[in-house]
Amino acid sequence: MKKYVASAFLVTSLLISGCASNRLELTGGIDPAEKTISAPAGSMAILGPVKRKLVVIGLKVDEFVQMNTRYKLTVNTVRTQLLCWNEWSEVAYEIMFLDKKARTEVFRISGESCDSYSDVGDAFENALKAAEAKSKGR
């Protein structure tokens, strides 16, 4: 019986650990006069919550032409765990917000998240707000 309890505790601990952590590297600001961004088409997985935050903060998202935009969004993901606390899987991700005109990175977020990705959307929105504040000198 003790073995089963210990095994259940270990499995539960592994499922809980790892989900919903992120790191932000803020290196630039967002020009309020040029709020256009090219982004990958679609809205599956992490891309959906991230693109919704772009619209909320007032950026015009271009999924098609992508030539006449000031900024560019790139998203990289990889599944790292089959099971995550009360969800199906965990992914490691890296999101880069690039300034095409200045040829620099505005910010980068990386971390781990579970299937709902709501924590990624919130972290991305916080990064957007921090980049806007940085451009305003706050």
Image: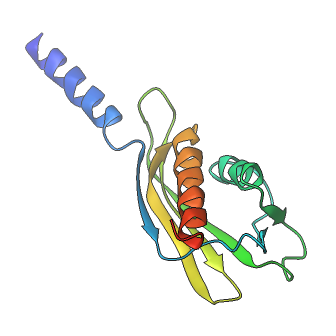
Residue at left offset 33%, top offset 33%? 16
Percent of width and height locating residue 62:
85, 67
- Left or right of 27 on screen, residue 47: right
Question: Which quarter of the figure has residue 23?
Answer: bottom left
Residue lying at the far left of the rendered structure? 2
- Residue 87 vs residue 135, the one in the foreground: 135
Picture mark count? 0
Q: Position of residue 85 (x, y in %)?
A: 41, 30
Please tell me in which quadrant of the rendered image residue 61 appears: bottom right
- The residue closer to the viewer here, 64 or 134, is 134
* Relative vertical location of residue 47 with respect to residue 62 in this rendering, above or below: above
The quadrant the N terminus occupies is top left
Query: Which percent across, then down, holds residue 100?
Result: 70, 85
- The answer to whether residue 82 is visible is yes
Colour logic:
rainbow
Q: Nearer the viewer, residue 129 or 69?
A: 129
